[in-house]
Amino acid sequence: MLIAVFSMLLASLIATVGHLTYRDYRSELVSARADGFAKQILASFPDLWMTYAADPSRFGERLREFVLFEPNTGLYLLDRQGRVLATAGDVHGFWTRYRVDLAKLLDDLHEDPTRPLEGDDPDDIDATAVVAARPVFVDRTPRGWLYVVARDPEVDAETALVIRGHAAQGLIKMVLLTLGIGTLLTVAIIAMLAHPLAALTSVAESIRRSGFAAAIPVHFPYDDRQDEIGRLSLTLHEMYDRLRQENERVLQSDARRRDMVAGVSHDLRTPLTALIGQLETIRLKGASLPEEIRLRYFDAAMQNAGHLRRLTDSLAEIGRLDSPDLRASPEPIALGEFLDDVAARFRAQADDAKIGLSVDYPEGLPLVQLDAALMERALSNLLDNALRFTPASGQVRVNVIRNDQNVRIEVVDTGPGVSAEDQPRVFDRFFQGSRHREQRGSSGLGLAIVRRIAELHGGKAGLTSVPSAGARFWIELPLIAAASAPPRQA
C-alpha cells in the first residue's frame, strides 16, 4: 500500500514537473516566435509609422494582412503611453481609457532580456499572455510600439475531451511504470538489507547464548563495508568487545571480592579464636596458673587484640581510600626533610631490632606535590614491612632517585626477598606471600594501601626483588616545576 501511494505521488510529481517544463519551453518558443514576427514586420516595412500617420483609419487593414499566416496572433500599434492606436482584430470601446502596462515590460526586459515576456492582452482587460514588443522609430526617434500577443488556439469540446483522455492515459502509464520500478527497487533494497541484518542477528544470538564466553570465537561480518551496514557491524563489534571486557572485569572483581571476604574471614578468625581461647584459659584457670604463665597469656591476648585492631583499621582505611569522592590534598614539600622525619619515627624500632636504618637523597631536590598525611602512611607501611622482615644486623635504606619527569622513593631491605611467583600479586589485597615473609600481625592490606596512595598522587608503586637477596619497594611520583629545596643540614 505504501509503495502504491508513493508511486502515485511520484508519478504526479513527475507529471507536474513535465507539465511545467513543457509550459516553460512552449512559452520560450512562442515568445521567440512572436518577437521574430515583430522584428520581421519592422524589417520589411521600415515606414510603418509613416503609413499609420498617413491614414490611421485604414491602418488596421494593413495589420490584418500581416497576421494572415498567424491566425492566433494579436497585432497592435501602441503609442508611447500604451494606448492602442490600431489593431489587426476588432476595436473595443474600453480602449479610450485602457493602457497596456509598458513599464512592466521594460522592467522585465531590463532584468532578463532572454526570459519570455508576459503582458496585457488588449482584447481581454483581465487576461495576460505571452507577448513581444518592438519600438517603432521615425528618424531614430521612438514614436510607438509594435505589440504582438501570442494566444492559444481555441479548442472545441470534443478536442479537449481527447486531450484530457490522452493526458489521463499518460498519467496512468506513468503511475504504473513508477509503481513497477518502485516495487523492483524495494525488493532489491530489502534483499540487500535482509541478508546482512540476518547475519548480524545470528551473531547477536550466538553472543546471547554464549554469555560472552571467551572460548567461543565471534566473527562480525561486513566490518569492511563503507556503508550503514558496515558501520552497524563495526559498532556491534566495538560494543561486544567493550561488554566482554566489562564482563571480564566484573568476573575478576567478583573473584577478588570473594577472595577478600575469605581473607578477611581468615585473618579475623585466627586471632579472634586465639584471643577467645586465651581469655577462656585465664577465666577458668587463672587462679591456679603461676603469675608468669598468666602474664604470658595476657600478653598473647593483647597481641591478638592488637592484630585485630590493626586489621580493622586497615579495612577502614582501604575502604576510605577506595571512595570515589576521596581526593588527595597535595602541597609543595621538601622531599628530603619529609623522609628524614618519617624515618626518625622508626629509628627506635630499628635500634631495638639491631637493624641499620639510613636515608639517602641527592642535594637540591625540587619540591614535590604530596599529601603529607597519606604519603606518611604509605612510607610507614613500607618501613614497617622492611623492619619486620629484615633479620638482625641487616640494613634498611630509604633512597631517592630523580629524573626529568618524576622522583622515585625506594625502601630497600636485606631480608629474604619476595619469590618470583609472589611478586605480581604482592600489592593485591589480603595476599599472603611465601612463609618466610609471613609474620604475625600482617593484615595483607599494607601494600594495597601503598599502591592506592601512590595512584591518588598520580604516581605508581612497584617492587624489584631477588629471592634471598632482599626487596626493593618503590613509589614513583611526578615532579613539579618549583624552586629547589634548602640544603641538607648536617
Image (tube, rainbow, N blue to C red):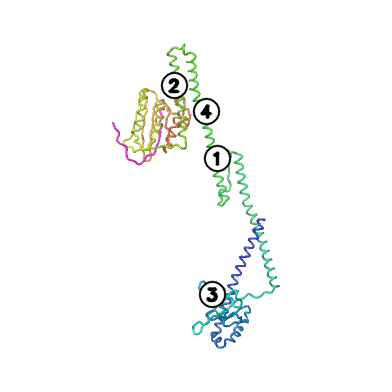
Q: CA distance from mark 2 to mark 4?
A: 22 Å
Looking at marks 2 and 1 on the same chain, the residue that comes earlier in the sequence is marked by 1
Q: Would you name the residue on which mark 2 appears? A: 303
Q: Give the residue displayed 42% in from the left and 35% down from the top.
A: 454
Image height of 350 relative to 186, above or below: above
Q: Residues within 10 Å of mark 4 (few under 14, many from 20)?
A: few
Residue 402 position within the rendered picture, expressed as x and y whole percent measured from the top left: 36, 37
Q: In what element is the residue under mark 1?
A: helix
Image height of 410 relative to 220, above or below: above
The segment highlighted magenta reads 469-490
Query: In the current view of this chain or complex, which residue is farthest to the right?
Result: 158
Q: Would you name the residue on which mark 1 appears? A: 244
Q: Would you name the residue on which mark 3 appears? A: 105
Looking at marks 4 and 1 on the same chain, the residue that comes earlier in the sequence is marked by 1
Residue 65 position within the rendered picture, expressed as x and y whole percent measured from the top left: 61, 84
The quarter of the image holding the N terminus is bottom right
Q: Would you name the residue on which mark 4 appears? A: 262
* Viewer-nearest of discs 2 and 1: 2
Q: Are marks 4 and 3 in contact (CB under 8 Å)?
A: no
Q: Nearer the viewer, residue 56 or 345?
A: 56
Residue 312 position within the rendered picture, expressed as x and y whole percent measured from the top left: 47, 27
Q: Residues within 10 Å of mark 2 (few under 14, many from 20)?
A: some
Query: Residue 44 falls in which quadrant of the image?
Result: bottom right
Looking at marks 4 and 3 on the same chain, the residue that comes earlier in the sequence is marked by 3
* Viewer-nearest of discs 2 and 3: 3
The quarter of the image holding the C terminus is top left
Q: Residues within 10 Å of mark 3 (few under 14, many from 20)?
A: some
Looking at marks 2 and 3 on the same chain, the residue that comes earlier in the sequence is marked by 3
Image height of 283 relative to 469, above or below: above
Q: In what element is the residue under mark 4?
A: helix
